[in-house]
Image (cartoon, rainbow, N blue to C red):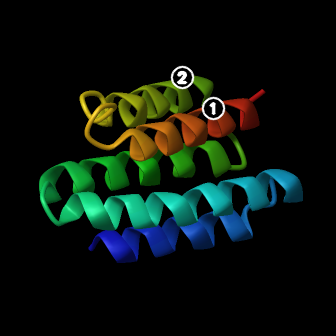
Amino acid sequence: MIKCTLSEIKTRIQKANSIKEGNKAELLSLLSTLKSEIEELSKTRADHAKSITGFADISTHEATREDTNQELLKLSIDGLSSSVKGFETSHPKLAEIVNSICFTLSNLGI
């Protein structure tokens, strides 16, 4: 399920007409790193890995919609950011990647 969701996110980013090519490349790079971090986390904390992946999916959906709803985008990004709270020490790279994704997605809505 996690791999499928991450694949759907990748496809959504690639097909999004509302995202500039430079931003697409950045998001795809971050997504690639997120994938490896999520795979590692899922070995010990599968439920948390699913939550983070789910919030990443929702946030990407909201950011790439043609008619972006800023309130929903903010809520979904806040959820994504919150999903890694507590992992800053045990999985610092995961927290860093998710925060970078949140920052990039929030800037798409500007």
- Residue 15 versus residue 83 in the image, above or below: below
Residue occupying the point 41% across, 31% down? 81
Q: Is residue 34 above or below residue 98?
A: below
Residue 40 placement: quadrant: bottom left
The mark found on residue 71 in the picture is 2
> For the residue labelled by badge 2, is the local secondary structure a helix, a strand or a loop?
helix
Q: Nearer the viewer, residue 106 or 103?
A: 103
Residue found at x 20% / y 48%: 48
* Residue that numbered label 1 is attached to: 103
Viewport quadrant of the C terminus: top right
The disc label shown at residue 37, or none: none
Q: Quadrant of residue 16?
A: bottom right
State whether residue 62 appears in this view.
yes
Q: Amino acid at mark 1?
A: Phe
Q: Position of residue 19 (x, y in %)?
A: 79, 52
Q: Residues within 10 Å of mark 2 (few under 14, many from 20)?
A: few
Query: Residue 71: x and y, percent?
Result: 54, 22
What residue is drawn where x is 44% and y is 49%? 56
Quadrant in which residue 100 is drawn: top right
| Badge 1 density bin: few <14, some 14–19, many ≥20, Cα 10 Å | few
Q: Is residue 66 above or below residue 14?
A: above
